[in-house]
Image (cartoon, grey):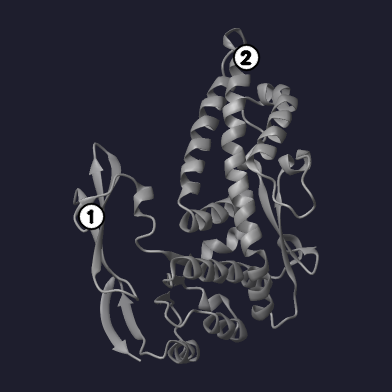
Amino acid sequence: GSQFATVSVQLANHYYDGRIQLDATVRLDDGRLKTLFKANASTLRSRSDVLGYLPTVSFFLPDLLLLRGGPEDRRRWLDSAIVQYDKRHIVHLAEFQKIRLQKNRLLKDPPEMFSKDHLSAWNLQFAAASAKVIASRLTYLAMIEDLVAMTHTALSDAKERLNMRYQSLVLDRVEGVAPGEIPGTASLEAALLQLLEEKMPEELRRGTSVVGPHRDDIRFFLNDMEAEAYGSQGQQRSIVLALKLTELQCLNRKLQEPPVLLLDDVMAELDPDRQRLLVEHIHPESQVFITTTHPTSTWQSLLERQSGEGTAVFRVCQGELNSAVEV
């Protein structure tokens, strides 16, 4: 029955004294939910300003859709990972989304109102914004590719070889780029403009943008076979875990501060070997929150050995915190 709710968190850095209080308030205003963020009582202008205060890597059961789901699930994972690593990516995404919506509105105009010159002008902006998003994605994937492969090799006890591939119509049109080289934004933009010109009749017929970063995909291969089609549930979980643990390592390396790791009821989905390998790959200084409906002494003792400090177990029943027990 309340009009608002606030969550507050005290943040402490590993390497210097001082604390930051971060507040998130969700308010009901004329039937719409609005969110307000504050850092040390100072209002932050936008959601992007919150980035960096509390770097986290999370793994929830829906993250398994990374392989079982559609391309939008894989794009969402990739963009979220990049945004934490490079805040500029959220600006590129917002710019692209704004231009795409404007262009789609134009494509839905009745024929008597349509102007090809107007569409070509939007395509210039669309290509420039799309090139930034795709270049950012390609750069991040190239950075993590070897590390993901190494992590997955460990998680699979060296039984499988993992490869990733960014799939985009645009990449087939890029000229003057050597195999294995990441194309620059100028090359991507030129290829996009060529492709947009070719696809204009189709876009007009369908009334929407049919090429661009919103149509791209990330494919995963185990021993050169498509993991989405041929990987078992356990193999698919290992791929997602490898990606998440790589996020953790990359953020820790860049920020010199181990991110908080959030694992939501994933242990029940992993066999004992994968539980052990997961815990062994957690940074010793990372703060880890694990939720589960089936706690086991096995991975609790693994965490104890990995962290070198006591772990606290909180038991919650029907929304009430019943106890906090030091293990």
Amino acid on which the number 1 mark rests in the picture: Ala
Give the total of numbered labels: 2
- Is residue 68 visible in the rendered image? The answer is no
Give the camera-side residue of 261 and 192. Answer: 192
Q: Could you tell whether 117 is left or right of 283 in the image?
A: right
Task: Tell me which corner region of the image, top left, top right, bottom left or bottom right, holds residue 103.
Answer: top right
Above or below, comparing residue 119 to residue 14 in the picture: above
The quarter holding residue 32 reads top left
Name the foreground residue: 96 vs 266.
96
Label 1, on which residue?
A: 5
Q: Label 1: how many residues lie within 10 Å, few (<14), some (14-19) or many (20+)?
A: few
* Lateral position of residue 130 relative to residue 232, left or right: left
At which x and y percent is residue 114? 60, 12
Mark 2 → mark 1, Cα distance in angstroms: 49 Å
Do the residues bearing badges 2 and 1 touch, measured as CB atoms within 8 Å? Answer: no
**Is residue 172 shown above or below 182?**
above
Residue pictured at 78% horizontal, 39% vertical: 175
For residue 3, say whether it is visible: yes
Q: Secondary structure at mark 1?
A: strand
| Image coordinates for residue 227, horizontal then vertical, percent | 73, 64
Residue at left 62%, top 64%?
Answer: 144
Which residue type carries mark 2? Asp
Q: Nearer the viewer, residue 131 or 27?
A: 131
Residue at image mark 2: 117
Residue at x 73%, y 81% (from the top left corner): 158
